[in-house]
C-alpha cells in the first residue's frame, strides 16, 4: 500500500474473486446440501455474510483499500453460484471421486427455498426433470453425455446466473478473442481478470485438452479414463436416489 | 465443395443452468444444430415441450434451414437455442 497501492488493490481484488469462486464449489455444497438438515446452523450465504464479508470489509478499511469493483456482482452471486456448482457436481457425478448427496428431498428443498427465495424459480424445474427421470427409471437421462464449458479464468463451469433488466436471471457466455483464439468466461469479472493478466501462464481447461486431441476418445468415457476414474471410484448419488421416492405420484385408488 | 467437418461450439439451451461443449458439423442445418444442442439438456434437465425451436447466433435468430457454413459459425463460437 505504501509503494504501489494500485497493484495492492488489484491483487486483493483478483484473489478475493478467485477465492470466492473456488469457495463456492468447495464450501457451498457442503453447507447447503451435504450437511444433514438437522445439523445446519447457517446457510452458506449466512455464513459468508457473517464470517467472510464483514471481516473482509473491516480489513479493507484497516489497510485503506476500497471494495472491489465487482462487489455487487459478488453479493448477488451468493444466491446462485454454489447452487449451480452443486447441481453441476451432482449431474457430472461420475467425474468426482465421492458420492454427492443431491440434497433436494422435500424437507431440504423447503429449507433451500426459505433461505434462497429465488431457488425454486431457477433450480426447481431442473431438479423436477431429474427427479422425474429417476422415478421413471430413465437413469441414462440423469447422466452427462458431454462436458460443461469451463471458464478460462476460474476453470469452473460457465453456470453463473446474473440479473437482466427484465428481472430474469440468466447464464450468459462472456467471450473474448485474442491472438486468433476464442476464450470463454463465466462472468464479466473473470474475463476482466484474465485480460488484465493475459500475459501470465495459461493452462488449458479440460475441455480445451479434449478439443486439442489430448483426451482419447474425445468423449465422456475418454474424459473419465483421462482423469483416472474407474467405475469403483466414480461418484454416484450418496443415497441411491431413495430421496426421489417421496416425489412419486400416488397411485389412484382403485 | 469441401467435406463437412466436425465443429465444437459453446452452446446453451433455454433455461438450462450451464453452457456446454457440443460438436456439430459444418454441413448441419441450424435445425439440426438445435437438435444436437437440445439433446444434452431437453429431457435431462429441461422439461420436453412440443414446440418449435429457434437458434441464435451473435444475438440474432438465424434461419433454421441455413447451414452452419452459411451462417458463418466458427469453432468455439456461442450458439443459444430455445423453444419458440
Image (tube, rainbow, N blue to C red):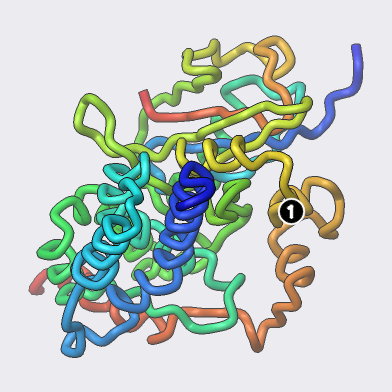
**Residue A96 visible somewhere in the drawing:** yes
Q: Residue at x 45, y 21 (%)?
A: B54
Answer yes or no: is residue A44 visible: no
Residue that extends furthest to the front in the rendered view of this protein: A2
Circle 1 residues within 10 Å: few <14, some 14–19, many ≥20: few
Q: Is residue B25 left or right of residue B79?
A: right
**Residue appearing at x 74%, y 53% in the figure:** A203
**Above or below, comparing residue A254 to residue A11 in the picture:** below
- Side of A189 where A50 appears, left or right: left
Picture quadrant of residue A237? bottom left
Camera-side residue of A28 and A98: A28
Residue B23 spot, x, y in % from top left: 70, 39
Q: Which residue is mark 1?
A: A203
The residue drawn where x is 30% and y is 77% is A31
Indicate the secondary structure of the residue bearing disc 1: loop
Disc 1 chain ID: A
Amino acid at each position: 500500500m505504501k509503494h504501489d497501492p494500485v497493484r495492492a488493490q488489484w491483487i486483493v481484488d483478483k484473489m478475493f474473486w478467485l477465492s470466492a469462486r473456488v469457495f463456492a464449489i468447495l464450501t457451498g455444497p457442503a453447507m447447503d446440501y451435504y450437511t444433514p438438515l438437522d445439523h445446519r446452523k447457517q446457510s452458506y450465504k449466512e455464513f459468508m455474510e457473517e464470517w467472510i464479508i464483514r471481516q473482509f470489509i473491516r480489513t479493507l478499511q484497516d489497510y485503506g483499500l476500497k471494495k472491489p469493483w465487482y462487489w455487487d456482482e459478488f453479493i448477488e452471486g451468493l444466491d446462485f453460484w454454489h447452487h449451480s456448482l452443486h447441481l453441476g457436481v451432482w449431474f457430472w457425478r461420475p467425474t468426482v471421486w465421492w458420492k454427492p448427496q443431491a440434497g433436494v428431498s422435500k424437507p431440504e428443498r423447503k429449507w433451500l427455498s426459505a433461505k434462497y427465495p429465488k431457488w425454486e424459480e431457477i433450480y426447481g424445474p431442473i431438479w423436477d426433470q431429474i427427479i422425474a427421470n429417476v422415478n421413471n427409471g430413465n437413469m441414462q437421462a440423469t447422466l452427462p453425455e458431454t462436458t460443461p464449458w469451463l471458464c478460462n479464468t476460474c476453470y469452473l463451469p460457465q453456470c453463473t446466473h446474473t440479473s437482466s433488466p427484465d428481472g430474469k436471471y440468466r447464464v450468459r457466455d462472456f467471450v473474448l478473442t485474442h491472438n486468433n483464439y476464442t476464450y470463454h468466461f463465466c462472468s464479466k469479472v473473470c474475463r476482466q481478470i484474465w485480460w488484465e493478466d493475459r500475459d501470465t501462464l495459461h493452462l488449458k481447461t479440460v475441455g480445451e485438452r479434449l478439443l486439442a486431441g489430448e483426451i482419447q476418445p474425445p468423449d465422456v468415457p475418454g474424459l473419465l479414463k483421462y482423469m483416472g476414474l474407474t467405475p469403483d471410484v466414480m461418484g454416484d448419488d450418496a443415497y441411491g436416489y431413495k430421496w426421489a421416492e417421496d416425489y412419486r405420484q400416488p397411485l389412484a385408488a382403485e | 465443395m469441401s467435406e463437412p467437418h466436425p465443429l465444437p461450439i459453446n452452446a446453451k439451451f433455454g433455461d438450462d443452468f450451464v453452457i456446454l461443449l457440443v460438436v456439430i458439423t459444418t454441413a448441419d442445418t441450424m435445425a439440426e444444430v438445435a437438435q444436437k444442442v437440445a439433446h444434452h439438456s431437453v429431457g435431462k434437465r429441461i422439461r420436453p415441450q412440443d414446440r418449435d425451436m429457434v437458434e441464435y447466433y451473435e444475438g440474432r435468430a438465424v434461419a433454421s434451414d441455413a447451414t452452419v457454413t452459411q451462417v458463418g459459425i466458427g469453432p468455439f463460437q456461442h450458439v443459444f437455442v430455445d423453444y419458440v
